Amino acid sequence: MDPENTSQPVPPVEARKRAVTIFGVGTAGITMAGQLASEDFTGAKLVALNTDHSVVATGSEMIHLEGKLLRGLGTGGDPERGRGLAEEHFQRLKTTCAGVEVVFLLAGLGGGTGTGVCPVLARAARESGALVLAFVTLPFVCEGNQRQRLARQGLDELTTVADGVICLPHQMAAKLLDEHAGFADTFRASAQLLIEGLRGVWRLLMHRGLIEIHFAELCAVLRAGHGESCFATVESAGLGRATATIEKLSAHPLLDGGQALAGAETVLVSLLGGPDLAMADVNRVMSELNEHCPKSRIIMGAAVDESFRDRLAVTIIATGRPAVSAKREPSKPEKAGLPTSMPGFETELLHPTKPERPGSRHLPPAPALSLEQREQILAQQTGKSGRARKPGPRMKQITLPLDIVNKGRFDKSEPTIHKGEDLDLPTYVRRGVALN
């Protein structure tokens, strides 16, 4: 018998009961909310919020923000319209969040509804007394710099009002698929990654832990580095579940083979298992994580749920700038002139390089000259030497023999005389300046 598995089973701890509402905001948020498995989020209320009447949500409450300006046609990609419409229905949003303890927001930033409505909805939820945690996606690079700029602006506004924000760029989902994957498949993969993160945080909040992670700790971690946060949720079952969980974490695309953990400032780890969760399993997982991030501040929590018998789920949220491998080089453009990877596309036009300053040269001192040699050099420079050139004839200013041109209406007018000079004559003639 393995001595590591001789520990007694941990007694289960009952799950928390909290009033939770999950908002799917905008078309992208409603699509992601529709992919949520109801059995994983039992007890949560799903609300779809949009400005476009053509988008219909199934399995959740639907809220259409009406406006005379929009006429039910949506915001047209303008966040200002979405923000103004949300402010107009601010009291209605507060009423929807009344009595709710935790509010989750699912949205895609870069458009009109998600970017404009989410910050206002988060503020309404906080004023109603709820804790707000947002899960948002950023556009692909190929979607253009306009959507990128609007998404960043919406992200900055959202982080000022939400308790915590987890941000996932769509570009990271490309790591899961090959280059021949469909465009829609890449969006679905990105949404699935975000849902995995939501599921991991949901388990962290809804299961009372033997080692507690408070929601305030989670919000503080996310608020400190939301823009550079990475997360992963994996699950394994069977006798070797701890080893299998470590292998899945090492291969997770969002952790970049463990490089994302190496430079993280704070790493939050939540373990969820059944009553048969062994101390040896917890030790294996945590010792492996400690090796990957020895300089990080690690916050660990563990909970037990009867439904997780013979299973182990681990959720990791790391904040801080990931360490960049010294061997990694910026991607080079292909022969056709297009970048192989848009995030790593670097050219001299985008990143001009300054020319290196040449090193200083040490010149030997000038040779010593005698008095006779110095006088000879001085005579050559002043033109007094025997080989000095003779001065040539001096140029003289003359008047060209041109015919007098008729001045028209000014023919009979008198010349302009100032201080004895005729100003009608060119200056170089009056002053005798030679034109070379």
Image (tube, rainbow, N blue to C red):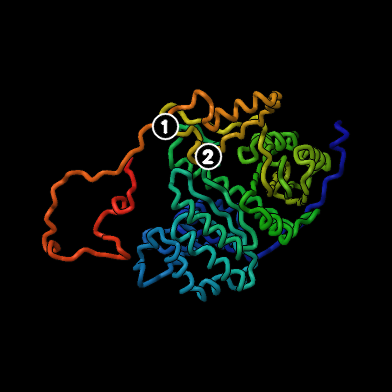
Q: Is residue 364 visible?
A: no
Q: Nearer the viewer, residue 253 or 390?
A: 390
- In which quadrant will I find the N terminus? top right
Q: Secondary structure at mark 2?
A: loop
Residue drawn at the location 65% of the way across and 27% of the way down: 374
Write down the residue under mark 1.
391
Amino acid type for the residue under numbered disc 1: Pro
Residue 37, image x and y in percent? 56, 51
Residue 104, image x and y in percent? 59, 60
Q: Nearer the viewer, residue 318 or 8?
A: 318
Q: Secondary structure at mark 1?
A: loop
Residue drawn at the location 42% of the way across and 32% of the way down: 391
Mark 1 neighbour density, 10 Å: few (under 14) some (14–19) many (20 or more): few
Compare marks 1 and 2 and give the one earlier in the sequence: 2
Residue 352, label in figure: 2
Mark 2 neighbour density, 10 Å: few (under 14) some (14–19) many (20 or more): few
Q: Is residue 5 visible?
A: yes
Residue drawn at the location 51% of the way across and 24% of the way down: 386
Residue drawn at the location 32% of the way across and 49% of the way down: 432
Amino acid type for the residue under numbered disc 2: Pro
- Up the image or down, 145 lies above or below 414; here it is above
In this rendering, position of residue 362 left or right of residue 72: right
